[in-house]
Image (cartoon, rainbow, N blue to C red):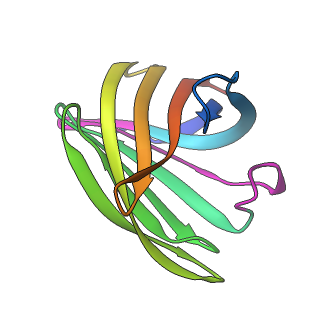
């Protein structure tokens, strides 16, 4: 259970219209990563670039699901589990809303030294599609 400094590259893609190319945002930041007998955990501080400045994001990667927790300016917890829909409260300084996350694919190639994680999912509000999203995450020792 060795916690070390890592470089975490997160590329997020989001589309609200299937006829348009997705919007893409990439963040490269320092963070922490550790492996446990149940999977892997990594975390980093969000920046002004993502619009979530003042928020710590943590991914807990387990064999059958990934849990993303945000604490700070924005507070939420999303569960990504392939083939299952989960609901979560999205709390912002402007208010809270209930949303659904429907996970299409989770591909983890994480190991003791880092690795890659990809999550494809859709977000909805009141069963109306808000966006289709993909996380491409790469973790390597600093």
Q: Is residue 32 above or below residue 77?
A: above
Look at the image and tell me in which quarter the N terminus lies: top left
Left or right: 126 as drawn, with respect to 9: left
Percent x, y of residue 129? 45, 47
Percent x, y of residue 133? 52, 34
Percent x, y of residue 28? 74, 33
Along the viewing direction, whichever of 124 and 82 lies nearer the viewer: 124
Q: Which residues are magenta?
A: 34-52
Residue 49 drawn in magenta: yes
Left or right: 9 as drawn, with respect to 57: right
Q: Residue 139, located in which quarter of the rendered image? A: top right
Along the viewing direction, whichever of 33 and 17 lies nearer the viewer: 17
Along the viewing direction, whichever of 141 and 129 lies nearer the viewer: 129
Along the viewing direction, whichever of 8 and 134 lies nearer the viewer: 134
Left or right: 131 as drawn, with respect to 34: right
Q: Residue 21, located in which quarter of the rendered image? A: top right
Look at the image and tell me in which quarter the C terminus lies: top right
Instruction: Tell me the residue at 55%/24% (across/down).
Output: 136
Q: Is residue 121 above or below residue 117?
A: below
Percent x, y of residue 84? 19, 41
Instruction: Tell me the residue at 60%/39% (across/down).
Output: 16
Residue 72 drawn in magenta: no
Q: How many marks?
A: 0
Instruction: Tell me the residue at 35%/48% (across/down).
Output: 101
Left or right: 53 as drawn, with respect to 90: right
């Amino acid at each position: 259970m060795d916690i070390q400094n890592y470089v975490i590259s997160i590329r997020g893609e989001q589309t609200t219209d299937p006829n348009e190319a997705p919007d893409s945002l990439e963040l490269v930041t320092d963070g922490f990563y550790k492996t446990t007998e149940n999977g892997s955990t990594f975390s980093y501080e969000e920046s002004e670039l993502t619009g979530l400045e003042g928020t710590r994001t943590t991914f807990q990667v387990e064999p059958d699901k990934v849990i993303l927790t945000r604490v700070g300016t924005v507070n939420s917890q999303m569960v990504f589990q392939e083939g299952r829909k989960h609901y979560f409260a999205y709390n912002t300084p402007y208010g809270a809303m209930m949303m659904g996350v429907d996970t299409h694919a989770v591909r983890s190639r994480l190991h003791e030294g880092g690795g890659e994680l990809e999550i494809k999912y859709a977000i909805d509000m009141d069963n109306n599609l808000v966006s289709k999203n993909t996380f491409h995450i790469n973790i390597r020792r600093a």
